[in-house]
């Protein structure tokens, strides 16, 4: 690397401050493995801790992009905690429910003494400007959860509601692609993150902060930090609904969300086959155990209309959504047909409720959104 370019890159990085530590990110030892190529491409790593602002990554990238001679910048985000050796612990955070009762999750093999020693998690914060917070979740990937979340959010916005869409799928942030927008997030004069807007809704995603092909190899504290910042430090304005697209499973992101704020309810997305509805059941039970009501079940890919005879074909079986809803004692909110143009619209950033509003899939999604809206009066 030419010495003068190294100096310029160091100078640029030194302009980015870590407010928690009161020094710049070079002095804090957060920048590692700086490398450049002859054509001006720069790559480096940032060690981010749970107490640091996630916007440090964006600020560092933008600072280096301004250096003359730099053509491209790639930033790899790493968990600073992974470089420290910590003693194993069986203690699990105990989240607080909206009723004030502990949101306690049992830990396998944890004895009574260690349970008593567990450190309580932060009490959920109420953000009145976010309106009704609804988590869209599933027990496994591949059921079309993000597609459903996007189309529900757009449907609510088209009905006149003020809607935000928060992409909490840290490991697979697909909202930027599905909404057809991917720009760096900016910060307003009040140091609030300015959400992007598309199809009438406000958007925030970790995909706007990291490189498209960069894996988020982050532990629980970092995930908690990102989700808290997306709730607290984004200039959402006044919303009626905040739709949160959750990652598959029942892991750190789900627990972090219910610890960070009051979630009005969860919508569980499944497909008809038993293997999917079984996983979705576990996801639903997780929300119930942390005092978040399950609004209902959405069965995606319910049937496919044969292009030759027009009759419905149950490619993935049938009845899974009904069985799951019955077991949970909640309504089946909707059955969404398998429609190839939904997939095409997701790749093109054109949700089906916008691209083909009169299609059977769009109508089903719109009616499902109406049922959800009727369950919760806007704030």
Image: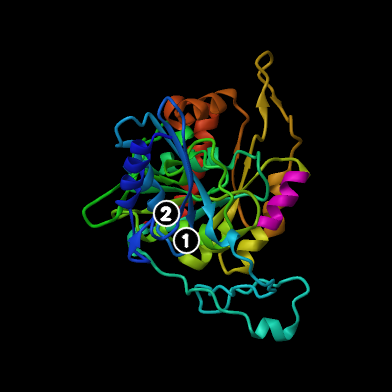
Secondary element at tag 1: helix
The picture places residue 84, in percent across and down from the top left corner, at 59, 64
- Rounded to the nearest whole Å, what is the CA distance between mark 1 and mark 2? 8 Å
Ranked by sequence position, the earlier of labels 1 and 2 is: 2
Q: Which residues are magenta?
A: 275-283
Q: Quadrant of the N terminus?
A: top left
**In the picture provided, is 291 more to the left or to the right than 63?**
right
Q: Determine the residue located farthest toward the front in the rendered image.
A: 3
Residue closer to the observer: 153 or 65: 65
Q: Which disc number belongs to residue 54?
A: 2
279 sits left or right of 183 in the view? right
User: Does 338 sit above or below residue 94?
Assistant: above
Query: Is residue 242 visible to us here?
Result: yes
Q: Residues within 10 Å of mark 1 (few under 14, many from 20)?
A: some
Most frequent secondary structure within the magenta stretch: helix
- Residue pictured at 56% horizontal, 62% vertical: 81
Q: Residue at x 66, y 38 (%)?
A: 142
Label 1–label 2 contact, CB within 8 A: yes
Residue at (34%, 43%) from the top-left corner? 7
Q: Note whether residue 201 is visible.
A: no
| Between 253 and 353, the one nearer to me in the picture | 253
Q: Give x and y (percent) for residue 116.
A: 65, 85
Across and down, in percent, residue 44 comes to 47, 43
Percent position (x, y) of residue 101?
Answer: 56, 79
Would residue 25 be counted in the magenta stretch?
no
Query: Of the residues tagged 1 and 2, which is closer to the observer?
Result: 2
Q: Which residue is mark 1?
A: 225
Q: Which mark is residue 340?
A: none
């Amino acid at each position: 690397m030419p010495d003068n370019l190294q100096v310029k890159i160091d100078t640029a990085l030194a302009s980015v401050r870590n407010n928690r530590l009161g020094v710049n990110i070079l002095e804090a030892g957060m920048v590692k493995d700086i490398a450049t190529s002859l054509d001006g491409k720069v790559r480096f790593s940032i060690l981010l801790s749970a107490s640091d602002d996630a916007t440090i990554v964006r600020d560092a990238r933008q600072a280096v992009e301004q250096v003359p001679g730099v053509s491209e910048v790639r930033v790899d985000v790493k968990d600073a905690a992974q470089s420290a050796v910590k003693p194993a612990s069986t203690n699990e955070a105990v989240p607080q429910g909206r009723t004030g009762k502990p949101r306690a999750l049992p830990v396998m093999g944890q004895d009574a003494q260690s349970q008593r020693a567990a450190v309580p998690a932060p009490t959920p914060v109420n953000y009145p400007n976010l309106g009704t917070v609804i988590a869209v979740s599933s027990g496994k990937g591949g059921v079309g959860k993000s597609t459903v979340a996007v189309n529900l959010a757009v449907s609510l916005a088209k009905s006149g509601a003020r809607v935000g869409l928060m992409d909490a799928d840290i490991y697979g942030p697909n909202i930027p692609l599905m909404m057809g927008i991917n720009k760096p997030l900016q910060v307003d004069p009040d140091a609030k993150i300015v959400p992007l807007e598309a199809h009438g809704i406000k958007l925030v995603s970790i995909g706007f902060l990291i490189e498209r092909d960069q894996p988020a190899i982050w532990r629980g504290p970092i995930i908690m930090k990102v989700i808290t910042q997306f709730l607290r430090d984004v200039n959402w304005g006044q919303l009626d609904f905040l739709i949160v697209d959750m990652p598959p499973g029942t892991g750190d992101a789900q627990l972090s969300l219910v610890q960070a704020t009051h979630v009005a309810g969860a919508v569980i997305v499944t497909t008809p086959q038993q293997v999917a509805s079984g996983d979705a059941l576990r996801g639903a039970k997780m929300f119930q155990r942390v005092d978040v009501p399950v609004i209902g079940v959405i069965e995606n890919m319910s049937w496919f209309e044969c292009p030759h005879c027009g009759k419905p074909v149950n490619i993935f079986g049938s009845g899974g959504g009904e069985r799951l809803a019955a077991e949970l004692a909640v309504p089946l909110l909707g059955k969404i047909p398998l429609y190839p143009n939904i997939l095409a619209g997701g790749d093109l950033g054109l949700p089906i409720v916008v691209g083909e509003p009169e299609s059977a899939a769009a109508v089903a999604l719109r009616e499902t959104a109406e049922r959800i809206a009727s369950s919760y009066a806007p704030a």
